[in-house]
Image: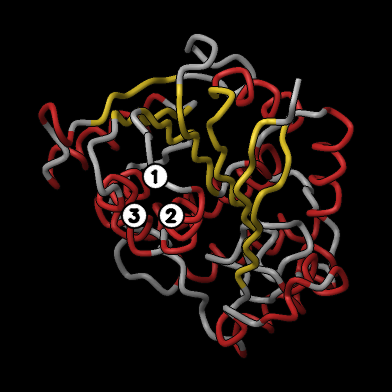
Amino acid sequence: MSSLGVRLLLAANRILPQPALPGQVDPFAYAQWEYDTSGPVVRLWHRAGTGGVRSALDLGCGLGGKTHRLVEACDQPVAWTALDIALDHVRKAEAYHQRVGLTGRERGVAKLVGDVASLPVADASFDRIVTADTLEHFPQPRLALQEMRRCLRDDGRLILLFNPWGSPRGSHLGDLIRLPWCQLLFSRQTLQQATLAAGERRAAAQPDPQEAAATNAFAKSLVDHFVHHVHPTRVAQFRQWLKDDRTFEIESELHVGPGPLRDASFLRQRWAEEWLTASYGAVLRPAAR
């Protein structure tokens, strides 16, 4: 017998619209979704200024779509490196980049596999580091910020974007759980059970056994990601880390709201940013040593 919380979440699925998320798609389609939704990070890239930028790192490159968009945003040649902790992601990013023409001396992107806790690059290697939709997935975000500072030149900039824990889609379960702010309303155990149950319901409606099995596997992967890779990260907490550790200073901030609130000015207010900001972004300059 499912719990009341699970039943409520499944009932909400029947009422609420499906969020605009990629869901179960092939790697190329997912990379295209990354490309299409990279507008906020490109805005921050331009805010940081591009004069004198010769080298840049996309940290947590995923399947390569965001890197593609950033390469296109450059008005001068930049030596890009795309890094991810997952070898499979890096391989798929390379295949995607080959397919869209990010090859050769001018447009090619170097690839690295590495952990943000110990990046496989020398000190002061980059003029820009971009890390989008990653901070909330780092087990040790403060250590990650310190490591990014090590790899950034003193006159460089870190461009960062993440989903606050209190945001409408902070659970990262939106492919199967449609209720916004569900992570604030239900226990983690209830959310795991509801995600698996939603996957089973969707699979039961699919006549092809292979598609049904893939849907159940997808639900399990969402739960695994939620359990092991989604850490409560708040904007106020992030600012305090910067102050306490003296890694970076905030030069510019960006608050992206959900749907019609995308560019609402009130999102910059402290009472609103944790709960109504879908993505929080910042341009950071290295703090004086």
Neighbour tally class for label 3: few under 14, some 14-19, many 20 plus, Cα within 10 Å = some
Outermost residue to the bottom: 15
Lower sequence index among marks 1 and 3: 3
Q: Is residue 184 above or below residue 289?
A: below
Please tell me whether mark 2 or mark 3 is closer to you in this view: 2
Residue bearing mark 3: 30
Q: Is residue 6 above or below residue 48?
A: below
Query: What amino acid type is highlighted by mark number 3?
Result: Tyr
Quadrant (top left/top right/bottom left/bottom right) for the C terminus: top right
Q: Quadrant of residue 256?
A: bottom right
Outermost residue to the front: 51
Query: What amino acid type is highlighted by mark number 2?
Result: His
Mark seen at residue 144: none
The spot of residue 214 in percent (x, y) is: 39, 52
Residue bearing mark 2: 46
Query: What amino acid type is highlighted by mark number 1?
Result: Thr
Query: CA separation, marks 1 and 2?
Result: 7 Å
| Of residues 147 and 48, the one drawn nearer to the viewer in this rendering | 48
Please tell me whether mark 1 or mark 3 is closer to you in this view: 1
Residue 1 visible at all: no
| Of residues 90 and 141, the one drawn nearer to the viewer in this rendering | 141
The spot of residue 100 in percent (x, y) is: 14, 47
Cβ atoms under marks 1 and 2 closer than 8 Å: yes
Image-based side of 240 in relation to 70, left or right = right
SS label for mark 3 = helix
Q: Residue at x 29, y 28 (%)?
A: 79
Mark seen at residue 50: 1
